[in-house]
Image (cartoon, grey):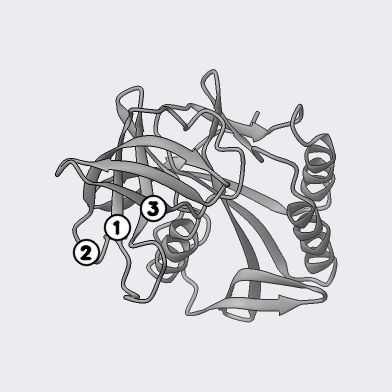
């Protein structure tokens, strides 16, 4: 997945009110960028760190830029929560995600029960519902999800179990937007209920795919599947 426009380099001054970040551009101008990540962003906030922004396409938007990534310990961490959904849809269509190859019909935002899932893919009579989650939290060498309590995420797990029980394939796809981690698991200390429901979902046959992604100022590229912890 390539960024449609050239990104703009700067340094993080501060993030505040969850959805805003002040950035010092290389030109010397200070701008306020939109932060799509509503979580704590623990382990991917460092004031003074290099960042990249994308220019807003809507001239009427209050913030002129969207914060895309931040340089942590020498590698880029993608913090735009919209990108994993865009990339996952593209990669499923192109059969670039191990275990999700060969689907001939791929749609986004499809409802099952009282939940709406990011992707519904079909092939040879098989229907697969896929929920995509953005992962940025790091603890040691592990990527963890979530970085804050997510009742919505818990509901998605419960509905994925119902998808599986109905005879269809159910997949939880975690897009890990950093390459400085070696494995993936639930953030039990942050949201123990989510961790419990994830284990129950896996026991019920819901598949978990932790896909590591390399983030660069040019775009996102899948690296491979991380082992579960």
CA distance for labels 3 and 1? 9 Å
Query: Which callout, 3 or 1, points at the residue further toward the start of the chain?
Result: 3
Q: Quadrant of residue 62?
A: bottom left
Estimate the x, y position of residue 93 in percent, counting from the top left. 42, 71
Looking at the image, which residue is at 83% across and 45% down? Answer: 197
Estimate the x, y position of residue 101 in percent, counting from the top left. 47, 64
Q: Quadrant of residue 160?
A: bottom right
CA distance for labels 3 and 2? 16 Å
Question: Mark 3 highlights which residue?
Answer: 33
Q: Residue furthest left?
A: 27
Q: Is residue 35 above or below residue 188?
A: below
**Residue 61 relative to residue 200: left or right:** left
Estimate the x, y position of residue 222 in percent, counting from the top left. 38, 49
Q: Nearer the viewer, mark 3 or mark 2?
A: 3
Q: Residues within 10 Å of mark 2 (few under 14, many from 20)?
A: few
Query: Which callout, 3 or 2, points at the residue further toward the start of the chain?
Result: 2
Mark 2 lies on a secondary structure that is: loop
Question: Mark 1 highlights which residue?
Answer: 54
């Amino acid at each position: 997945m390539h960024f449609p426009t050239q990104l703009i380099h700067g340094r993080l001054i501060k993030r505040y009110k969850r959805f805003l970040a002040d950035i010092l551009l290389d030109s010397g101008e200070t701008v306020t960028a939109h932060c799509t990540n509503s979580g704590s962003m623990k382990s991917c906030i460092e004031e003074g760190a290099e960042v990249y922004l994308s220019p807003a396409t809507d001239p009427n938007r209050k913030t002129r830029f969207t914060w895309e990534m931040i340089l942590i310990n020498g590698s880029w961490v993608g913090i735009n929560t919209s990108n994993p959904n865009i990339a996952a849809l593209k990669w499923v269509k192109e059969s670039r995600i191990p275990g999700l190859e060969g689907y001939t019909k791929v749609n986004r935002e499809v409802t099952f029960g009282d939940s709406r899932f990011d992707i519904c893919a079909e092939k040879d009579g098989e229907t697969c519902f896929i929920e995509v989650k953005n992962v940025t939290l790091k603890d040691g060498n592990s990527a963890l999800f979530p970085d804050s309590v997510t009742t919505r995420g818990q509901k998605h797990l419960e509905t994925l179990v119902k998808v599986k029980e109905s005879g269809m394939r159910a997949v939880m796809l975690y897009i890990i937007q950093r390459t400085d981690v070696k494995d993936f698991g639930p953030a039990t200390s942050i949201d123990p209920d989510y961790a419990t429901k994830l284990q129950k979902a896996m026991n019920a046959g819901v598949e978990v795919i932790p896909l590591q992604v390399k983030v660069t100022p040019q775009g996102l590229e899948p690296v491979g599947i991380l082992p579960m912890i």
